[in-house]
Every structure is written in structure tokens, then in C-alpha cells.
Amino acid sequence: MSKPSPWPVVHAERQALADDLARLDAAQWTTPSLCSRWTVHQTLGHMVAAAKTTPATFFAGLARSGFRFETLSAKNIARETSGSPAETLQAFRERISATTHPPGPSDTMLGETIVHGEDIRRPLGISHAYPVAAVTRAADFYASSNLLIGGKKRITGLTLRADDADWSTGDGTEVSGPALSLLMAITGRTAALDDLSGQGLATLRSRM
């Protein structure tokens, strides 16, 4: 049985994030996100760029960047944040219903929307209830892939178990906690570790 399309959730979560960001002041836009290299503004710029990217434009941009992904990402963020935060937010609003995305499965965009949404919200003290099924679906995706962020390698030899959802993955010493925090840990966000516990936590921490 095929999974339902992730796009309705992606679109709803983009809308919710845009609504949250509409209330930010100038200082909040410069807050470091959980992506340590990026501010809140830059993280949103990355999300705008991803929502504009197709496989064709991705590979063309990668070639122009000397096939260095980090260089391409930096160029895209610089382009999307060259104006004011309000302009970047408007560009994001214009892509809320987009289904374009870089090469790879559409679950990449589900994960991107949730993880980067939390990258932005947590440092700002903004709480948000993501759909549990979407969080666990994104966690399954990242736990089974080493693409870009190395999620599968990070949790090898560990069992991750949610204490607020019927979800677990892996085989080994246990790490438990909220499903959202487990997702953030799989994707390398050290801030999420404070929400977790278990005999495998020290191992997971050492892999961040």
C-alpha cells in the first residue's frame, strides 16, 4: 500500500511557519538557528531556495558551483536573503503550495519542512504541534538514509523509541524521548539531546 502524498502536510506546515514568522522583530531574524551556520533569516532563505529548485536547476547550479554542495547552498541562501526578512518571508509565502523540489523523494521536503521549521522555532521559543504521523514518517526517512546528513550512520546500533507516539526504529541500546526530538537528533541537532534519555544517549551524543 502506497503512502499518502506528503504535500498537504508540507503546505500546511509552511503556512503555519509563515504565520509564526510574521510576528518577528528585526533582532529575532538575526537569531542563530539550530543550523549553527545560519540565522533564522538564512534558514528561511534556504527553505525558499529548496521550494524553488527542480532537479534541472539543482544540477545546473551544482555544476556552476564546482560540484560543491555547500557552495551551491551558500549561493542560494545569499540570493534569497539579499533583501529584507519581510521580502524573504513574502517569497516563502509565494512558495507555500509549491511541489517543486531538488532531486530525491518528496519525503525529503516533508523532513526539510519539519526540521528547518523547528530549527527556526526552538531558538525563538516558539512551540508548535506538528502532526505526529508526519514527524514519525520524516524520522523513518532520515533513519534509513545517509544522504547529506548521515542519519542512518548516526543511529547505527541504537534503538530510538518515542515516548509520545507508537514509533521506534533501530536495534541496540535505547534512546527514548519525544518523537520530534528524536527526529531532530537523527538529523544532528544537539539541542534535542536534552529531551532524550536512555543507555544509548552517550553514544548518540558522541556522533553529533
Image (cartoon, grey):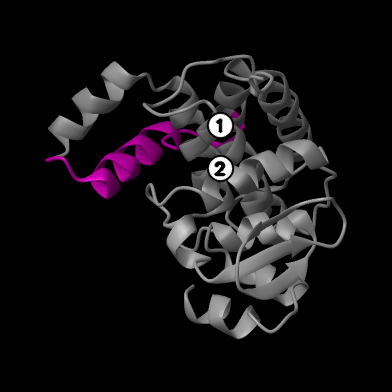
Quadrant in the rendering for residue 4:
top right
Q: Amino acid at mark 2?
A: Phe
Figure check: 83 above or below 142: above
The x, y position of residue 13, in whole percent, is 73, 31
Q: In terms of depth relative to the viewer, which is nearer, 124 or 177?
A: 177
Q: Is 75 colored magenta in this rendering?
A: yes
| Circle 1 Cα neighbour tier, 10 Å, few/some/many (<14 / 14–19 / ≥20) | some
* CB contact under 8 Å: marks 1 and 2: yes
Q: In terms of depth relative to the viewer, which is nearer, 154 or 69?
A: 154
Q: Is residue 104 left or right of residue 31?
A: left
Figure check: 144 above or below 198: above
| Circle 2 Cα neighbour tier, 10 Å, few/some/many (<14 / 14–19 / ≥20) | some
Residue in the image at 56% along x and 28% along y: 87
Real-space Cα separation, disc 1 to disc 2, in angstroms? 7 Å
The x, y position of residue 70, in whole percent, is 29, 49
Residue in the image at 64% along x and 80% along y: 201
Residue holding disc 2: 141
Quadrant in the rendering for residue 103:
top left
Residue 22 shows up from this direction: no
Q: What's the magenta region?
A: 66-86
Q: Is 123 colored magenta in this rendering?
A: no
The x, y position of residue 11, in whole percent, is 69, 22
Q: Is residue 92 left or right of residue 206?
A: right
Residue in the image at 39% along x and 26% along y: 102
State the mark number for residue 107.
Answer: 1
Mark nearer the N terminus (1 vs 2):
1
Q: Secondary structure at mark 1?
A: helix
Q: Quadrant of the N terminus?
A: top right
Figure check: 49 above or below 23: above
Q: Secondary structure at mark 2?
A: helix
Residue in the image at 81% along x and 37% along y: 131
Q: Amino acid at mark 1?
A: Asp
